[in-house]
Amino acid sequence: SLRKAYIELAYNLYAVEMYPDSLVFYINDTHTFTYPRIETDKEGQFPFAHKEFYLLLDMQLGGSWVGGVDPADLPVQMEIDWVRFYRKDP
């Protein structure tokens, strides 16, 4: 159908909101995950506070979070239309 074809060609919208105590992730305006800053004696649990960093865009195949890769699903491709970075005024 035309609707199905449009959905397959449409881009997803990914967002990450950074707070002093967490990172909050969204896909198409739906909250999908929160990475909290927790009190711990381990160094590096929340490396995002008070440091400059780079945004790296990556497509993970396989691994502990996503499981194995089915060879029937290969090859894959990631297309990026645009990237924007907004900084909230203090």
Image: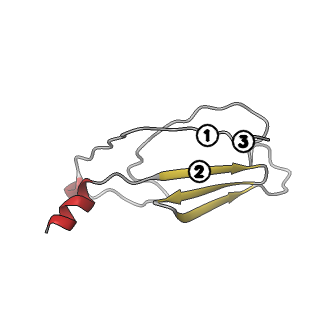
Question: Dot 2 corresponds to which residue?
Answer: 16
Disc 3 versus disc 2: distance between alpha carbons? 12 Å
Instruction: Tell which tag, 3 or 2, sits nearer the viewer.
Output: 2
User: Where the C terminus falls, by quadrant?
Assistant: top right
Residue 38: x, y in percent?
A: 80, 57
Total numbered labels placed on residues in the image: 3
| Element type at mark 3 | loop
Residue 10: x, y in percent?
A: 30, 54
Amino acid bearing label 2:
Val
The image quadrant that residue 31 belongs to is bottom right
N-terminal-most mark, 3 or 2? 2
Instruction: Tell which tag, 1 or 3, sits nearer the viewer.
Output: 1
N-terminal-most mark, 1 or 3? 3
| Element type at mark 1 | loop
**Residue at image point 36% right, 40% down:** 81
Amino acid bearing label 1:
Tyr
| Element type at mark 2 | strand
**Residue at image point 44% right, 53% down:** 13
Disc 2 versus disc 1: distance between alpha carbons? 10 Å
Residue 7: x, y in percent?
A: 27, 61
Q: Is residue 47 above or below residue 35?
A: above
Q: 90 or 54: which is nearer to us? A: 90
Circle on res. 48: 3
Q: 83 or 20: which is nearer to us? A: 83
Residue 50: x, y in percent?
A: 79, 36
Amino acid bearing label 3:
Phe
User: Where the N terminus falls, by quadrant?
Assistant: bottom left
Q: Is residue 18 above or below residue 64?
A: above
Circle on res. 86: 1
N-terminal-most mark, 2 or 1? 2
